[in-house]
Image (cartoon, grey):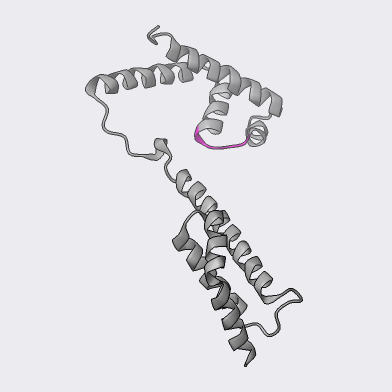
């Protein structure tokens, strides 16, 4: 009997037990059968089986493939959940009342920005709209990074309080 025939015989003898072994790990008999088939394809082509017996080696291959499948499916489900970000979904058009409120809020914010000292306004615009870092803004305005941070914080507090003035209680 050839070596490959011996491996096939070992596989066929223990196939059902291997499927039974993989099923509770995976939680699905159909997937367990797929894993056992993949294990056979990994088991067959090699020359000599490692120092452990052929059956133990098959069980190890099945276990490792099952664990790999669980990890892969967990990663895929995490990835798929990340695609369902609610704030990325299209939003229906705002009602005329909502558009009016939003327009009023934008007008208030624009007036507050106009009233800010020039360096403070520039720091907020560069940071929030331009995407500049605090260090870049500090270099441009010729002030320290801590000063830029303080200017932006003060401006954001003023902007937030302007929005809170007319907010319903």
Q: Quarter of the image for the C terminus: give it.
A: top left
Q: Position of residue 96 (x, y in %)?
A: 23, 22
Classify residue 5 by image quadrant: bottom right
Asked if the magenta segment contains residue 68, the reply would be no
Q: Along the line of sight, which residue is nearer the eye, 73 or 133?
A: 73
Q: Is residue 58 visible?
A: yes
- 125 vs 67, left or right, is left
- 27 vs 51, left or right, is left
The number of numbered discs placed on residues in the rendered structure image is: 0
Q: Is residue 143 visible?
A: no
Classify residue 166 by image quadrant: top left
Q: Position of residue 57 (x, y in %)?
A: 67, 71
Question: At x 58% / y 27%, what residue is drawn?
Answer: 123
Q: Along the line of sight, which residue is nearer the eye, 139 or 93?
A: 93
**Given the current orientation, which residue lies at the most extreme top position?**
169
Tell me the magenta residue range: 129-133
Query: Measured along the vertical axis of the image, is residue 76 above or below residue 4?
Result: above
Q: Main secondary structure of the magenta part?
A: loop
Query: Measured along the vertical axis of the image, is residue 39 above or below residue 84?
Result: below
Query: Measured along the vertical axis of the image, is residue 49 above or below residue 99?
Result: below
Question: At x 41% / y 35%, what residue is drawn?
Answer: 87
Q: Position of residue 164 (x, y in %)?
A: 44, 11
**Given the current orientation, which residue lies at the most extreme right position?**
51
């Amino acid at each position: 009997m050839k070596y490959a025939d011996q491996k096939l015989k070992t596989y066929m003898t223990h196939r059902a037990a291997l499927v039974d072994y993989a099923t509770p790990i995976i939680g699905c008999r159909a997937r367990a059968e797929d894993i056992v088939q993949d294990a056979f394809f990994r088991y067959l082509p090699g020359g000599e089986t490692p120092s452990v017996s052929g059956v133990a080696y098959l069980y190890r291959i099945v276990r490792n493939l099952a664990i790999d499948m669980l990890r892969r499916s967990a990663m895929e489900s995490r990835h798929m959940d990340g695609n369902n970000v609610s704030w990325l979904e299209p939003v229906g058009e705002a009602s005329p009342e909502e558009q009016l409120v939003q327009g009023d809020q934008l007008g208030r914010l624009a007036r507050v920005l106009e009233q800010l000292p020039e360096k403070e306004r520039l720091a907020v615009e560069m940071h929030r709209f331009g995407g500049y870092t605090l260090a870049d803004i500090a270099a441009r305005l010729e002030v320290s990074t801590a000063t830029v941070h303080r200017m932006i914080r003060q401006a954001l507090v003023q902007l937030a309080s302007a929005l809170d003035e007319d907010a319903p209680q």
